[in-house]
Image (cartoon, helix red, strand yellow):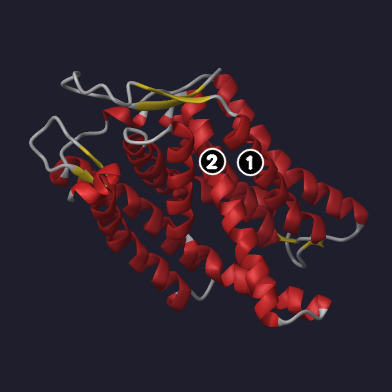
Amino acid sequence: MGGKSRNLDTDNSGEGRRFSLWLYLVVVFSVSWPFQMAMLFLARSWKSAMALSCASMIMVGVGTFICGRYIFRDGFATAQWRWGKPAHYVAVIAFVAFLWVLPTVMDISAGSAEIAEGIATGSILITLSLMIPLLLPAAFGEEIGWRGYLLPRIARTTSPRKAVLLHSLIWWVWRVPLVGVPILLEARDASLAFGIAPALAVSFMVLVGILAGTMQGVIFGFVWARSASLAVVTAYHVAYDAIRDSIVVNIMTGPLVEWWASAIICVVGALLLWKGDWHAQGAHRQADPNPEPKITAER
């Protein structure tokens, strides 16, 4: 790309072309969005919807591989190929349980939620065990793309905090087909329940969706940076999606579950973005023939 878009480009040390954010996004969206569209128009059950959603997530990794291996040829050394510490896995799973399990238990205890008719409690665990193998490659596909590849490249030309925010906004835009239908359904329910204009309900839900989705991206970026591990952030992604979907599929959720996770994510993400001690290591090492820019969060 030309000089006017220099802030979105980075030079490579290999034989590929200069990294272009826009070209990367065109490739990734082109190979992954068709599966999201198919989910919206062709899925007839939560199983088929999940299969197409996972396919879309995997294709983020495929598109990233095409870019890193054949288009830009800048490799994947920035992805943080480490297993991470056991404490990191415990922390992310505990956080997911706080987001979804705790409000569910509270709703059931208050009588505002119940196990769906015909569903045994063990079915939740069965659903969870079936989802995890399917989500593992899907979550890895997203994480190698958004966190392992894209985030450190954006950080080469801007501050770590701005890089995290930009990558989070991009991630939210990519997820619009996945979250668009739930947002419309929630807006419809809010319009009927509170007697507000449908347009106002949709606008409010979209704003909430953008904020929660972007702050979730910040949290994902923080987990990846703090643990310095692609495996840990993948585990967080799998735990979040599997536990959330297992609860939603098997339990008639109450009002607390509907808002608890979004509210906590917004608060935690905003605090991390504002107060987190983000810093880049080697983001502008032009003298290094093999630069490996990283974003890390102060431990």
Q: Given the current orientation, which residue lies at the most extreme right position?
A: 110
Q: Disc 1 residue type?
A: Ala
Q: Nearer the viewer, residue 299 or 64?
A: 299
- Residue at position x 34%, y 51% in the image: 60
Mark 2 lies on a secondary structure that is helix
Residue 108, compared with residue 101, is above or below; it is below
As drawn, is 253 to the left or to the right of 214? right
The x and y percentages for residue 273 are: 58, 36
Residue 169, compared with residue 277, is above or below; it is below
- Residue at position x 42%, y 33% in the image: 159
Badge 1: how crowded within 10 Å, few (<14), some, or many (20+)? some
Residue 229, compared with residue 263, is above or below; it is above
Q: Select label 1 or label 2 by which is in front.
A: 1
Callout 1–callout 2 Cβ contact below 8 Å: yes
Q: Disc 2 residue type?
A: Val
Q: Kindly identify which residue carries mark 1.
A: 270
- The numbered mark, 1 or 2, whose residue comes first in the sequence reads 2
Residue 129 visible in the snapshot? no
Q: Nearer the viewer, residue 129 or 62?
A: 62
As drawn, is 149 to the left or to the right of 223? left
Indicate which disc residue 218 carries.
2
Q: Nearer the viewer, residue 210 or 91?
A: 210
